[in-house]
Image: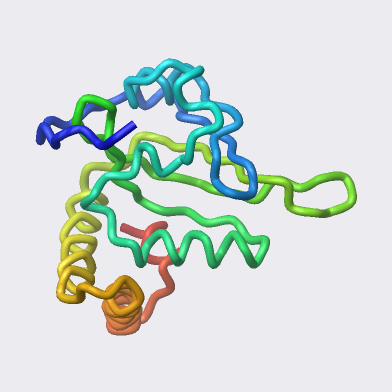
Amino acid sequence: MSSPARSGHERFFPESEIIVSKTDLKGRVTYANKTFCDIAGYDEAEVLGKPHSLIRHPDMPRAVFKLLWDTLEERKEIFAYVKNAARNGDFYWVFAHVTPSFAADGAVIGYHSNRRTPKRAAIDVVAPLYAQILAAEAQHKNGKEALAAGVACLTQTLAALKVSYEQFVLTV
């Protein structure tokens, strides 16, 4: 499934609904609720077994996903604002809470994500920051250098604000 052309149209979902998905350790979807399927524009059968990155919007900086995966590898939860892509090229913002899923023996067996409707005022702060990070990444052709530039941009911005990413997203 290739990414559709961007439509520039924003989708919304009711504040009363929560987008829920689960993945295996490699990020392949093992569960997607009806709200996930409706907003993303896929049937459940179309997303099961597919990489969760299927809904990744190109406006999302790689550095934010590195932070997300690094946090999950530490067996910790993370909150993040994420811009996702719907099947038809529309986009939608979410406030995500992602956690590792644990087996009875304590082993991480996958990941669970609940996404809520974000506050518009938060998106007005987050979107320009993400654009700045994405621009830093875009200055490099080499993937590793691009990611390093994005991480540096994010780290410097948060240091200047004297907050962690978690503090930033929970207070905007």
Which image quadrant is residue 66 in? bottom left
Q: Does 49 sit above or below residue 111? A: above
Q: Does 2 sit above or below residue 33? A: below
In-front residue for pair 75/126: 75
Q: Does 128 sit above or below residue 99? A: below
Relative side of 32 to 75, left or right: left
Q: Residue at x 43, y 25 (%)?
A: 36
Q: Residue at x 41, y 21 (%)?
A: 37
Relative side of 34 to 5, left or right: right
Residue 19 place in picture, x, y as percent = 46, 29
Q: Residue at x 30, y 79 (%)?
A: 145
Residue 21 place in picture, x, y as percent = 53, 33
In-front residue for pair 126/70: 70
Relative side of 124 to 53, left or right: left
In-front residue for pair 86/164: 86
Residue 167 place in picture, x, y as percent = 43, 66
| Quarter of the image with the C terminus in it | bottom left
Which image quadrant is residue 131 in? bottom left
Q: How many marks?
A: 0
Residue 154 place in picture, x, y as percent = 31, 74
| Quarter of the image with the N terminus in it | top left
**Residue, far right:** 105
